[in-house]
Image: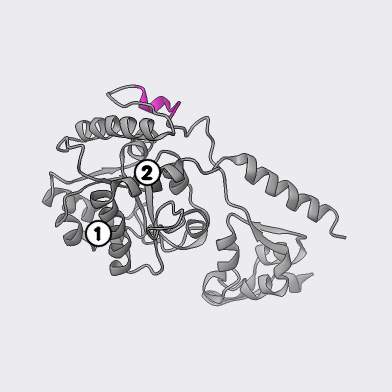
Amino acid sequence: HTGAFHLDDPMEGQGMNILKAGIEYATKVIAVSPGYAWEISTDEGGWGLAPTIRNDPMKISGIVNGIDFDTWSPEHDTHLQSDGYQTYGTNLEGLWTGKQACKAALQRQLGLPERHEVPVLGFIGRLDEQKGLDLILDSEEYLMSRDIQIVFLGSGRQDLQDRLYDMECRNRDKVRAWIGYSDQMAHRITASCDILLMPSRYEPCGLNQLYAMHYGTVPVVHAVGGLRDTVLHYDGENEGTGWTFERAEVDKFQWALGQALYSFWDHRDSFMGVALRGMHRDLGWDHAAYLYECKLLEAKYAH
């Protein structure tokens, strides 16, 4: 069976790969989103395993993760029950009153000017190239020329941490960077922000965009992997749940964010509609578990 392990890796050269053998001998291979299942079948996204995956495309599928409503729910979130934060329902009244209360609490906690009319943007994630943080940092002039506030939560590469600190120091009335990780702050930022930024260069599934939508926070994402599967771009007429851009480039990111900000400022009813549609999506594990069960039954009776 040694042939099943042999891999001609485009980066490392000839070698043995356990995952390649696993794919070859598996009856079914389930990725964490349909989009990522397709991406790993391409030479760019497969990292040497693409030919193996393409040999039997019928065994490859993708199922998006669900979220745990016991932990992530704006109606019951324990992190929103103190310091001026507020739990809220998933209807228009709940979204409007709850998010305004949470936004004000976040601004007070982080020392930002307390302004309910300003859109608050959030970024939660590792500070590295994969998460696309550089696209945000390279957009500093674009962002700071607009009436916004932006909050970062994460840790990672020292050079990116230094750039975040510098951006905050230059714009103390608009930017806050929380270096490190805090589960409490992740929940509070998700509940308080109007827009969540996820410009990831690749994202097999992604959970933050799911949390954001459930809390009525509109995602702006790079349309890759699970982000493409879970966030429908709003074009002004469809049932969109956020805004997406097709290439991880600064101008494309700014275009998508500009669409979201324009809607927030000039078409608030449409913006709130996008947020509400995200809140009402079935993002839990019940549907995902059903799809996994179907795949396991297919595997059971495949031979």
Picture quadrant where residue 215 is located: top left
Asked if the stretch drawn in magenta spans residue 247, the answer is no
Q: Which residue is mark 1?
A: 137
Residue 4 showing in the rendered view: yes
Q: Is residue 104 above or below residue 170?
A: above
Tag 1: Cα neighbours inside 10 Å, few (<14), some, or many (≥20)? Answer: some
Which sits in the foreground, 20 or 294? 294
**Residue 229 at what x, y percent from top left?**
52, 57
**Residue 188 at what x, y percent from top left?**
34, 34
Q: Is residue 54 above or below residue 236?
A: below
Q: Which residue is mark 2?
A: 217
Picture quadrant where residue 1 is located: bottom right
Report the amino acid beneath label 2.
Thr
Quarter that holds the C terminus: bottom right
Picture quadrant where residue 32 is located: bottom right
Marks 2 and 1, Cα distance to the nearest angstrom? 21 Å
**Residue 65 at what x, y percent from top left?**
57, 47
Which residues are the magenta region? 75-81
**Residue appearing at x 41%, y 68% in the figure:** 246
**Residue appearing at x 49%, y 31% in the figure:** 71
Report the amino acid beneath label 1.
Leu
Which sits in the foreground, 153 or 286? 286
